[in-house]
Image: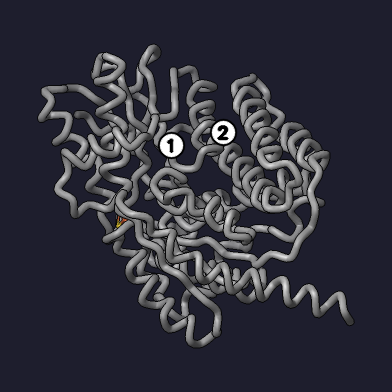
Amino acid sequence: MVCIADMSLVRRGDVIFVPPMEPIVARLTASVFRALGYGAEVLAQTPETLAAGLACTSGGECLPCPATIGSMLTTIEARGLDPARVVFFMPSTCGPCRFGQYATLADMAFARRGWDGVRVLAINSENSYGGLGSRGRKLLWHAIVVSDIMRKIVLKHRPYEDEPGAIDRATEEWTERAAAEIETPAPDLAAVLRGYAAAVAATPCTPRPKPKIGLVGEIYVRNDPFTNNGVIRVIEDLGGEVLASSIGEWVLFCNAVEGFRTWTSSTFRRGRLTQLLERAWFLSVERKYARAVRRFIEDREEPDVMDVIAAGEPYVPREFHTETILTVGRAMLFVARDKVDAIVNASPMFCMPGTISASIFARIEKEHGIPIISTFYDGSGDPNKTLAPYLHYLVERAQAGAAAHSAR
Ligand code: SF4
């Protein structure tokens, strides 16, 4: 296997496979690669692909590892692809967790099958994913922001739809349109977002009292309906409405970490200036799309990542550059700013930042008197079962509160 950090070793005619993670962003990311002139598809994930991944790992790895490796192996084998023409997109990060080892484990699995030359495109957060090149990075950020906003709209409306499946059908149609738009020479994704919002607005919905649940946790598992056993659907089916951490939050966090580093670096001026310019650009894109559908998401506005970090800092030092501070900080803002009724912290079993977050949440739960449910996934059983009693109580409380309010 060859680990590549930029696009220079990807050839025309190769196929880049994107991990499935969050369904909208995965499809838009594949479109970004196609817009750059490469073949690209989203990896399939099934119980069989997961079994293939578990069979070639030791069992102690966190779930995204066997999930992604199993999908890669099965894709090559089931479709008879030439391993030398395949590229797997696996954005990586440095820091005190296992993510940096995924590519090594994938390499061992490929070697056992005698495959040489499989490439893993492991662009790194250390340089804000600069390995994608300027156009690729820009397009990818647009894709991430648009998919985050589309998901906010889904989550806000789907629990109240009168016809089950109507919001999902609209989302499916407009995700396809967004993906096609990205591949045009001058994509107008704001127009696509406006079209999507209008389609959702035309879908009959009935407001009902429902508890609001903030979803935080490890980025892959909290976003991937396959590995988290459809946790968002489960909460909705149990009568709740989900407010979820965004994917863009991680990119802005990496940028913020770069800023902390450059404060103390000898290349302070240049590094700090670059970081500030990048942050300004990231935020300007966020504002542009938020403006396009303000009416729909003004109560779901993304907090500044510096506020998320500040909210997590009483519990986790900012020098500890893992997801823990984001998980804790965003949970705190869901409670203080968005007034959620409970938090779900979804992480893979054995996830190091997830486990640390869960231990901190025990203290926050006591301090703030709000239920915080940590669910850990390893590909077996049904961890979401623990949500049912919480949601039962929270739904009853929301309905009783609404009844008391209307009796006044
Ligand atoms: S964040 Fe958690 S799940 Fe992700 S690689 Fe690190 S330890 Fe594994």
User: Any mark on residue 20, and which?
Assistant: 1
Image location of residue 318, percent across then percent down? 42, 71
- Give the percent coordinates (x, y) of residue 127: 40, 46
User: Alpha-carbon neighbours of circle 1 within 10 Å: few (<14), some, or many (≥20)?
Assistant: many
Q: Residue drawn at (36%, 16%), measured in percent from left and top?
A: 14
Q: Position of residue 204 (x, y in %)?
A: 81, 44
Q: Is residue 265 above or below residue 140?
A: below
Residue 283's x, y, as percent? 64, 51
Quarter of the rendered image showing ligand 1: bottom left
The answer to which image quadrant residue 175 occupies is: top right
Q: Please state which amino acid type lies under the numbered disc 1.
A: Pro
Tell me: 145 left or right of 385: right
- Residue 56 placement, left or right of 264: left
Which circle's residue, 2 or 1, is located before the other in the chain? 1
- Mark 2 residue type: Leu
Badge 2: how crowded within 10 Å, few (<14), some, or many (20+)?
A: many
Query: Could you say which is closer to the camera, residue 189 or residue 204?
Result: 204
Dot 2 falls on a residue whose secondary structure is: helix
Dividing the picture into quadrants, the one containing residue 168 is top right
Marks 2 and 1 sit apart, C-alpha to C-alpha, by: 18 Å
Task: Give the vertical position of 115 relative to 20 (above or below).
Answer: above
Per the rendering, the mark at residue 139 is 2
From the viewer's side, name the closer residue of 361 and 104.
361
Q: Is residue 358 visible?
A: yes
